[in-house]
Image (cartoon, rainbow, N blue to C red):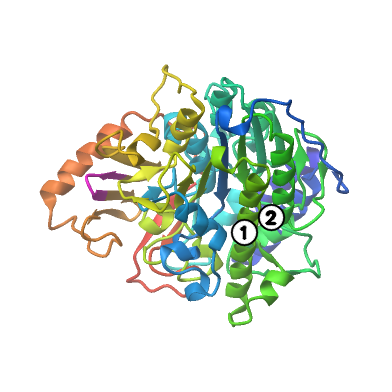
Amino acid sequence: MKAWKLFTGIVVVLVAAGAAAWHFRFDLIIMLARAKQPKIEANHAVTWAQGPVATPAGQRPPNVVFILADDLGYNDITLNGGGVAGGAVPTPAIDSIAHQGVTFANGYSGNATCAPSRAAIMTGRYATRFGFEFTPTPVAFSRVVGGHQGDPLHPSHFNKDEVKNTPKDDNTEAVPSTEITIAEALKTRGYHTVHLGKWHLGGAKGSRPEDQGFDESLGFMAGASLFAPVGDPSVEESRQDWDPIDKFLWGALPFAVQYNGSTMFNPSTYMTDYLTDEAIKSIDANRNRPFFMYLAYNAVHTPLQAPKADYDALPQIKDHRLRVYGAMVRNLDRNVGRVLQALKDKGLDDNTLVIFTSDNGGANYIGLPDINRPYRGWKATFFEGGIHVPFLLRWPGQLPAGAVYRSPVGHVDIFATAAGAAGATPPKDRVIDGVDLVPFVKGKASGDPHKAMYWRSGRYKTVMAGGWKLQVAQEPNKAWLFDLNTDPTERRDLAKTRPEKLKEMQAILAQLDSQMVKPAWPSLISGAFYIDHPGGQKAKASDEYVYWDN
């Protein structure tokens, strides 16, 4: 602790030293982040709790398996018209969930970045209703990234005046314990609840998965992890030198997991493979009782690391970075297929609701231009590329195979949909923004599930209603208005030509915004994101952009 306080003091002094000292400051950040890592043991086996003998699968409530990808672009799966590098990486397993179930053609994430989106998923509520507005980020890291002036047109900002209002320990930046999670709701119906992979909703006691309704948790609390040790000869790597966050991840992340708060230990193999191996073991352990599994892969989030076997299978992709990314998508899809096969092998397939989505759109900082096509924008923007995500449900015998549902739905609906399948009652003492999607798909509920959908991150707010979408930013001081009915890819801004519709949408936005609470912790950094090109490309003054507060 003394070393950390000394380090932060050094950073404060060096911030004034200008660009020449930036790399030195960043290297100090990485060095101290490594020093703060807890002890990591060698791999050891996890013993999953065995369920008792119970009634046959078809005579008990359905299992719920929720698979969440990380930063998967809308165009990364072949179902959505492309796949990586124009279809060079087919995704048959993920596509099969749609072919055997329902595609929500207009599925939206809870937010345009990972942690607030996951908070919305877990609670069925806009995360801004309980203050989880920004992704938890250490102050020292924000200070240095905010001081990175890689973009001369629109440099990043560090909000130093808010440091005094930031919790001393970023692990306390979490979903409040007063919120009710999907796991807690399903436990009221006798479900055994399992979390695997990324959490990112709080690492302190009281906010960890095992404190928020999960009987068992195997994964990591932070927002990212290595997929394998750096330099592993069985893995291909790609680094994006222009991105300070990428540099930090390579230097500071551990390759480690923990089980129910135990000492951290190294996985036995590549992270996505390892999480799947353990998910299959857990499915076997729970085959005789209803269970809820939250399988939160960190694929395909950076750092870009892919098994060499998957990389070697894609010689048709000549660009190294795209090939590594494509190999990660290939690996993710194969592992989704392994989970689906395990359900079949255990006779659980017909009595399991499978949900698949991504926490937000594909990220600009990997420098690949096509991952969100045909949509504009990226993760950390409210353009469609940032929030329009793959969204699939499969429940044999309950949902029609190959159906396409076109009304807008969102991550907030996952809570109510899972609860509805389990026969659980959502809490009635608070606003639940999501709805059970099953009656809508089956035609038992009419109309659209939502009159309006809402997003906010600091000074940047968005609302969608009646097929129209309004985005309002303070930096730049601008409003974008799109008619998604005729312009789903947001090419024609109508803010100036449809003043009456602009006023109507502003009123809807204001009404929803008034229901939200202040952020539980402040935004420390704002960075510019260009709408129409990824990171690593030189920007022009005419390029559209928006600042993202975090």
Q: Please tell me whether residue 526 belongs to the stretch shown in magenta.
A: no
Q: What secondary structure is found at the residue carrying circle 2?
A: helix
Name which residue type carries label 1.
Leu
Which mark identifies residue 272?
A: 2
**Residue 200 seen in render:** yes
Name above or below for residue 542 compared with residue 456: below
- Is 507 positioned to the left or the right of 513 in the image? left
User: For the stretch drawn in magenta, what is the main secondary structure?
Assistant: strand
Of labels 1 and 2, earlier in sequence is: 2
Residue density around tag 2, few if under 14, some if 14–19, many if 20 or more, within 10 Å: many
- Image location of residue 113, percent across then percent down: 49, 49
Q: Which residue is mark 1?
A: 332
Instruction: Please tell me which residue lies in front, 23 or 220.
Output: 220
The disc labelled 2 sits on which kind of residue?
Thr
Residue 69, position as x, y percentages in the image: 56, 52
* Residue positioned 62% across, 59% down in the render: 332
Q: Residues within 10 Å of mark 1 (few under 14, many from 20)?
A: many
The magenta span reads: 463-469
Q: Is residue 407 left or right of residue 379?
A: left
Asked if residue 465 lies in the magenta stretch, the reply is: yes
How many marks the image carries: the answer is: 2
Secondary structure state at the residue bearing disc 1: helix
Q: Is residue 21 visible?
A: no
Quadrant of residue 287 within the rendered picture: top right
* Pointer 1 with pointer 2, Cβ within 8 A: yes
